[in-house]
Image: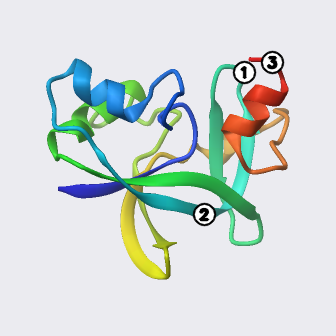
Amino acid sequence: MQNVFVYGTLRAGEINDIGAAAARNDIAAPTLVGSATVRGRLFDFGAYPGFVPDDAGIHVQGDVYEIDDGLVAVLDEIEEVYPGVEGLFLPREVTVEVEGAPITCRYYPVQREAVKGLPEIRSGDWVAHRRSNGR
């Protein structure tokens, strides 16, 4: 088991809902640990967001799940992360706080160069941003 921080389309109710992804692949359902934030900048790619870590950035909203190790390969496929290939999303680790407890999580930020010219989501919340834009 490991933890993952999701900030975009992997959040519950979104197009790549992490729970639905597990169910489609006959993998144990992820367990919601709680909400958390990570400092950075969130950008609108249209159908999905991209997160750039930045200690001087805002608090980007997301959720922490405990997941079965088998779900990592599914998440990597959704985020188009392949061994030996530098893609848009980069699997990394981050430590977040959930109810005052530090938790180390896998997450998927994007390469800084990829966001040039894209609108920034200043609220730091993809779900609220998507809904406010009628998507």
> Which quarter of the figure has residue 50?
top right
Which residue type does callout 2 highlight?
A: Val
Residue 38 is marked as 2
User: Measured along the vertical axis of the image, is residue 12 above or below residue 100?
Assistant: above
> Is the Cβ of the residue at disc 2 closer than 8 Å to that at disc 1?
no
Q: Which residue is mark 3?
A: 134
In the image, taking residue 38 as reference, residue 74 lies left or right, namely: left
> Which quarter of the figure has residue 36?
bottom right
Screen quadrant of the C terminus: top right
Tell me residue 113's x, y (percent). Answer: 69, 42
Residue 46 is marked as 1
Tell me residue 108's x, y (percent). Answer: 47, 45
Cα distance, mark 2 to mark 3? 25 Å
> Is the Cβ of the residue at disc 2 closer than 8 Å to that at disc 3?
no
Task: Please report the residue visible at 85 percent of the width from the left and 35 percent of the height from the top.
Answer: 119
Who comes first in sequence, dot 2 or dot 3? 2
Which residue type does callout 1 highlight?
A: Gly
